[in-house]
Image: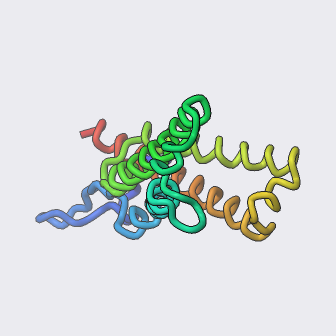
Amino acid sequence: MPGRRVPGELGWKLDEQGNEVSVTVEPGLPLRLLSIVPFLLVAVTGVVALIGWIVIVVLGGGVREPIWTWIAHTPARDAVPQVALAVGLGLAALGITLLSMWAAMRGFSRSAGRLFWRVAEAVFSLIAILLLIVTVTKPGIAAALGLSGGEWFLVFGLLGYSLVMCRLRERRSEIFSEEEAHE
């Protein structure tokens, strides 16, 4: 039984009379820090994507011209879908960045609940399954995106790490919740 405490183990201390009493053991700082690393990596990637979107799409960095200059000499039937795509990409990058920052803050809290960690575990699992399906069904997609095989394995490793951390925090949340229910 994962929530049961035995006197003498971690989670017990001596009271004023010298008797061992159970104490609530919350997720420690190292576990809390390690569990938000995946969310922080997504947030940093999102910030980089937003900066790239602003520099390349909006300001016309590199060999491209700014989007408003391109719109000025492009027919509306061609410009409207492209502008919608550009705005959609920017909003998607912003949304993913904000969501991952919120998840990092929520995951860092001592009381992030089981539901949060189960949803995070489901999202990481879905991403891993989709990446696996894409790499098996379309083996040339990594080369088309400019990624080496080692980089794909790094992504799979990070997803595996994320799943392990979610499960550890979910288990710690269950123990924490059971102790609160008994009090």
Say which quarter of the image contains residue 16. bottom left
| In the rendered image, the vertical position of residue 4 relative to residue 59, given as above or below | above
Picture coordinates of residue 25 (x, y %)? 32, 58
What x and y, as percent, mark residue 69? 48, 51
Above-or-below relation of 157 to 77: below
Where in the figure is residue 75, as x and y percent of width and height? 58, 34
Q: Across the whole image, how many numbered discs are drawn on residues?
A: 0
Relative to the observer, which residue lies in front, 128 or 5?
Answer: 128
**Colour pattern of the rendering:** rainbow
Farthest residue toward the front?
A: 73
Residue 137 appears left or right of 31: right
Q: Residue at x 38, y 65 (%)?
A: 10
Of residue 1 and residue 85, the one placed in the foreground of this image is: 85
Q: Position of residue 74 (x, y in %)?
A: 57, 40
Q: Residue at x 44, y 37 (%)?
A: 115
Q: Residue at x 57, y 60 (%)?
A: 64
Q: Is residue 28 left or right of residue 21?
A: right
Residue 38 in sight here: no
Q: Evaluate whether residue 57 shows in this view.
A: yes
The residue lying at 34 percent from left, 49 percent from top is 106
Which image quadrant: the C terminus? top left
Q: Residue furthest left?
A: 16
The furthest residue to the top: 77
Q: Nearer the viewer, residue 132 or 52?
A: 52
Q: Is residue 63 left or right of residue 110?
A: right
